[in-house]
Amino acid sequence: MPLALLALAVVAFGIGTTEFATMGLLPQIAHGIGVSVPHAGNVVSAYALGVVVGAPLLTGIGARVPHKRLLLLLTGLFVVGNMASALAPDFGTLFAARFLAGLPHGALFGVGAVVASRLVAPERAARAVSKMFLGLTIANIVGVPACTALGQHLGWRSAYGAVAVIGLVALAGVAAFVPHQPRGQQSGIRHELRAMGNKQVATGLATAVVGFGGFFAVYSYLVPMLTHLTGIAGSSTTWVLALYGVGMTLGTLIAGPLTDRALRPTMYWGLVLLAAALTTFYFTVHSTVPALITITFIGAMGSLITTPVQMLLMSKAKNAPTMAAASNHSAFNLANAGGAWLGGLVISAGWGWASPNLVGAALALAGLGLAFTGGLMERGYRRSEVIAQASPAAEPEARVGIAD
């Protein structure tokens, strides 16, 4: 089990590295393929679009494929996408290659989370999933700075080549250590889509889009905030982002045990504390030490939300959790796009570089409202279920109002 989880964490490490390293290499990419930096930034959007499209699409296509085989196929596609990125001769080819590299992202996390949860006893499932997610957070501490430095010194193509090598290591680890997990008799695209119609799943995905959008409203503009307001040199911002990753790692470490103990309270408090941290950063961003402490806390609270949302979706999707778990990562990428857009709006409106923090806090609180709505819906379902079980004579009528 530890080696299987390590193999899944290496997959997550590779995904986190390729997703965020591109942002630090945009000047080199722009120079290498002969376009402007803003135009080169579209390759980041291409990857995100691949994630949004690929999570439900590839999970649906692979609905009857055994989990281990599907993990191997998806990891292989990840390697191909990054190798294609390293060899792309022009912007159009690179755009397509980044879209291809993003396609397996959500499905890998979704299938990996389901596999990880089934490696352990049910009461330790969230801890197992959080250990896989550690690969993503550690990528922000080690993988992203290392690949950024590699790309700056040896050319941006070398960074994607290095990610492809990480993918090959992950492929070997999955093949060697992840056990075979057969699909149930009810597996299939129709069963997965039926589970996606659950109101709790829809509410959970909406919570991820809105609540985590608060995190990305600030993360997207963190570098200009640090250089314009905090006074940190541009050459040092990479290591500050690594500090953000340290916070994310700490949050992931505590999220697993807390989620196993109390899923919804962990999600509620994570959103409350994220809103509080973002509001605090609005005031501390002007002073170096308080700003760095607050950044670490924001990273921790952002990661504290990820595991309970993932486990909530897998729980409410019941016997077809794979597509729900994968769609969570489509939701996070929509949060990335939406949070960055709203943060950019207030900056463009002249509210100042610190203003995305207030937007982020508002989004976190809106996500909290959606999470509470899901909790109230769940209480109503349980009350109806108790009434139905206690009143056999009235069972047909009582069950009419029960939400699946």
Image: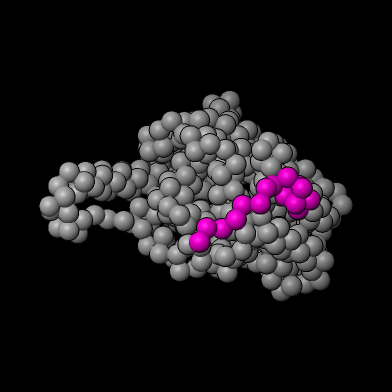
Report the number of numbered marks. 0
Residue 286 sits above or below residue 310 on the image:
above
Q: Residue at x 41, y 60 (%)?
A: 195
Residue 32: image quadrant is bottom right
Expressed as whole percent of the image width and height from the top left, the position of residue 74 reads: 67, 60
Per the image, is 177 magenta?
A: yes
Taking the view exactly as shown, the residue that stands out farthest to the bottom is 92
Residue under the point 65% across and 60% down? 70
Question: Would residue 132 be visible to someone looking at this image?
Answer: yes
Where does the magenta region start and end? 170-185
Between 374 and 297, the one nearer to me in the picture: 374
Front one among 22 and 111: 111
In this rendering, the answer to whether 116 lies above or below 397 is: above
Name which residue lies at 50% across and 30% down: 257
Which quadrant does the N terminus fall into? top right
- On the image, which quarter does residue 399 sit in? bottom left
Determine if residue 272 is in view: no
Vertical order, 309 against 77 (above or below)? above
